[in-house]
Image (cartoon, rainbow, N blue to C red):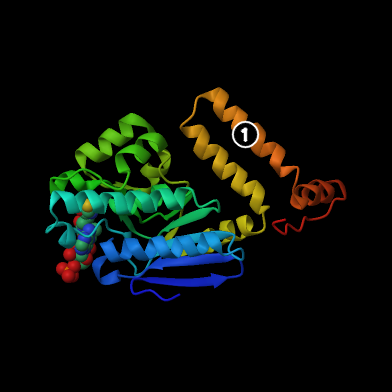
Amino acid sequence: MTFRNLLVEDAGAVRRITLNRPDKLNALNHDTLTELHQAFAAAADDPGVRVVVLTGAGPKAFVAGADIAEMNGLTPAQARDFSRHGQRLMSRIEQLGKPVLAMVNGFALGGGLELAMACHLRIAADTAKVGQPEINLGLVPGFGGTQRLLRLAGRPAALELCLLGQPIDAARAAALGILTRVVPAAELEAETLKLANQLANAAPQALRGILDAVLVGGEAALDAGLEFETQVFAVTFSTEDMKEGTSAFLARRSPNFTGR
Ligand code: COA
């Protein structure tokens, strides 16, 4: 599968998707959103892919936002479609059923932060800056930013970032819970791939159960979330990987998870 605005490469079971419009700081235009939809659908369908790493090309940016030049000419009806196109992509990533790591190599602004927040883990360079600067353009976030930031970091952070539109540095974003981990820029790739490989060696169906349970539970009453967790827990007992993981522990050896 080849794309105009993405690079896709595999290393073992880790698929790396790189947004590749560095001259526009990897801004998300309509075509790039469409390509991301296709790339994530392909990653979901490919049993050889256990983990996805998403990053941006070039030294400056993960993604500097939705494409402002393209948005400048949109009618309200087109803007509604653009928002839905972006929101569906974020939901597709969130619901992929395989862990997705955002490797935040620089600016993650607007749609860039929304994209990173749809990923399950966010590993950032200490030089990265994140924010929701849409207010400075007379806009509101349109790819889920108001909702996912609220859920990730609570009302104070969501209101501060969206109302003031001022990017914050990676250390503060981690302290607010927006970033999972911050590492020196020179170590970003190695640290991210270390985590990706750890996840690639974990039991895929158990990973999926955790992803699903946390996602469902985030929107459910506690009893409903607990019941969902029980069902997911029980399903893992039907897998060979559960037998392998528990047997390996008892035999004091490393498990070999096959995905069955
Ligand atoms: N949409 C479209 N193009 C963008 C963009 C975006 N969100 N962000 C950056 N670009 C383009 C610039 O227009 C410029 O293109 P040009 O060289 O053809 O003029 C190129 O990317 C480089 O950006 P530039 O602004 O020159 O880089 P910088 O290092 O001076 O500043 C930022 C970096 C991130 C501070 C600045 O680009 C910026 O504020 N971007 C917009 C952020 C934003 O508001 N995002 C939310 C959008 S809803």
Q: Residue at x 29, y 66 (%)?
A: 31
User: Where does the image place residue 100, in percent across and percent down from the top left?
Assistant: 50, 54
Which of the pair 157/35 is nearer the observer? 35
Which of the pair 64/97 is nearer the observer? 97
User: Where does the image place residue 235, in percent across and percent down from the top left?
Assistant: 70, 41
Residue count near mark 1 (Cα–Cα under 10 Å), binned few <14, some 14–19, many ≥20: some
User: Where does the image place residue 32, in percent across and percent down from the top left?
Assistant: 32, 65
Quarter of the image where the N terminus is located: bottom left
Q: Which residue is drawn at 61% across and 61% down?
A: 197
Q: Which residue is drawn at 30% across and 70% down?
A: 21
Q: Count of labels shown?
A: 1
Quarter of the image where the C terminus is located: bottom right
Which of the pair 106/224 is nearer the observer? 224
> Is residue 173 shown above or below 183?
above
Q: Name the residue under label 1.
A: 229
Locate residue 202: give its quadrant.
Answer: bottom right
User: Where does the image place residue 222, in percent across and percent down from the top left?
Assistant: 54, 24
Q: Quick check: is the Cβ at mark 1 less than 8 Å away from ligand 1?
A: no
Which kind of residue does numbered mark 1 sit on? Answer: Glu
Q: Could you tell me which secondary element the residue under label 1 belongs to?
A: helix
Q: In this view, does 1 lie to the left or right of 60?
A: right
Question: What residue occupies the far right of the structure in this picture?
Answer: 251
In this view of the protein, can residue 60 be seen by the observer?
no
Question: What residue occupies the far front of the structure in this picture?
Answer: 77
> Is residue 105 shown above or below 247?
below
In this view of the protein, can residue 256 be seen by the observer?
yes
Q: Is residue 73 left or right of residue 151?
A: left
Q: Residue at x 82, y 51 (%)?
A: 248
Locate ligand 1 by image quadrant. Answer: bottom left
